[in-house]
Amino acid sequence: MATNNQQNIIRTIAAIPQRIIRYISGAVTRIFGLNDDNYPATGVQPYEGDPTDEKRH
């Protein structure tokens, strides 16, 4: 019969794949999930500045 310490080790080893899958699925959900950005609608931004006459390489 396994001791309490051995049972804890077995549970920990069994939980590792579950944690990895949960971590990856959380990332996939965040990447491909609905947009939760609350940025204000800014519209078209005016152009400020003129191009220089000098050409630099």
Image: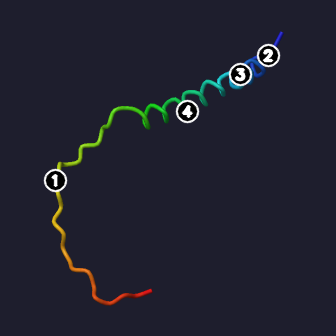
Q: Quadrant of the N terminus?
A: top right
In the rendered structure, find residue 24 and report the number of the disc placed on it.
4
Residue 12 appears left or right of 44: right
Label 3 sits on a secondary structure element that is: helix
**Looking at the image, is 25 positioned above or below residue 10?**
below
Label 2 sits on a secondary structure element that is: loop
**Looking at the image, is 21 positioned above or below residue 48?**
above
Mark 4 residue crowding within 10 angstroms, few (<14) / some (14–19) / many (20+): few
Query: What is the C-alpha distance between the residues marked 1 and 2?
Result: 66 Å
Please state the horizontal and vertical placement of residue 16, each as a whole percent of the image.
Answer: 66, 28
Task: Give yes or no for contact between labels 3 and 1 (Cβ–Cβ under 8 Å).
Answer: no
Q: Residue at image x 18%, y 49%?
A: 40
Q: Earlier in the sequence, mark 1 or mark 4?
A: 4
Q: Residue at image x 18%, y 69%?
A: 47
Closest to the camera, between mark 3 and mark 1, is 1
The residue labelled by disc 1 is: 43
Closest to the camera, between mark 1 and mark 2, is 1
Residue in the foreground of this view, choosing between 57 and 7: 57
Residue in the foreground of this view, choosing between 3 and 33: 33
In the rendered structure, find residue 8 and report the number of the disc placed on it.
3
Q: Earlier in the sequence, mark 3 or mark 4?
A: 3
Mark 2 residue crowding within 10 angstroms, few (<14) / some (14–19) / many (20+): few
Residue 47 appears left or right of 9: left
The residue labelled by disc 2 is: 3
